Amino acid sequence: MHATTPAPTTPLRVGMSHRELLDQVLDTWSLLVLEELCERPSRFNELRRAIPAVTAKSLTATLRRLERNGIVERKVTGLRPVAVEYRITPLGKTLREPVDALLAWTTANMAAVDAARDAFDRLDED
């Protein structure tokens, strides 16, 4: 019998730094911010309007994390009044392919996941 997928050449090792970065880049607000910034640079209030469920505090924290990780850059665009614009960096753009792959996987497998959840919940009720 032949395997359908080739064996990985190196074992998958998920370390603390991997988990921390994935947590910071793939959380709910980060994904929504990246979705907006992939389309065009935006100011803070534009992002707030585009993502109405996010609080100002959470959006600020999300933007700072993404900026710290080199995914988003903050650019001052005016002096009076001071205007700040956020844009995705070249490094941030490299996230598009893996995020699209994860979204495609969730779309393709959502029915199976829902069925597994239902089966689990039914067992848990007994």
Image: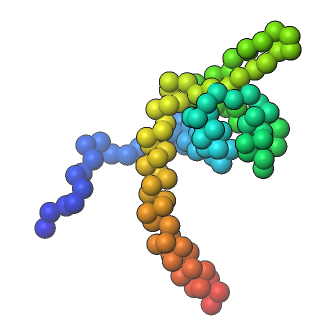
Asked which colour scheme the image uses, the reply is rainbow
* Direction from residue 80 to residue 92 in the image, left or right: left
Residue sitting at the far bottom: 126
For this rendering, which residue is in front, 48 or 110?
A: 48
Residue 73 in sight here? yes
Quarter in which the C terminus is drawn: bottom right
> Could you tell me residue 57's position as x and y percent?
82, 38
Quarter of the figure with residue 79: top right
Quarter of the figure with residue 34: top right
For this rendering, which residue is in front, 120 or 66?
A: 66
Residue 16 in sight here? no
Q: How many numbered discs? A: 0
Instruction: Determine the residue positioned at 78% across, 39% down.
Output: 48
For this rendering, which residue is in front, 57 or 19?
A: 57
Instruction: Determine the residue positioned at 47% across, 51% down.
Output: 102
Instruction: Determine the residue positioned at 74% across, 28% down.
Output: 43
Instruction: Determine the residue positioned at 71% across, 23% down.
Output: 85
> Could you tell me residue 111's position as x and y percent?
49, 72
Residue sitting at the far top: 79
* Direction from residue 9 to residue 83 in the image, left or right: right
> Could you tell me residue 59's position as x and y percent?
76, 37
* Direction from residue 41 to residue 107 in the image, left or right: left
> Could you tell me residue 76's position as x and y percent?
73, 15
Quarter of the figure with residue 82: top right
Quarter in which the N terminus is drawn: bottom left
Residue sitting at the far left: 1
Above or below for 67 versus 30: above
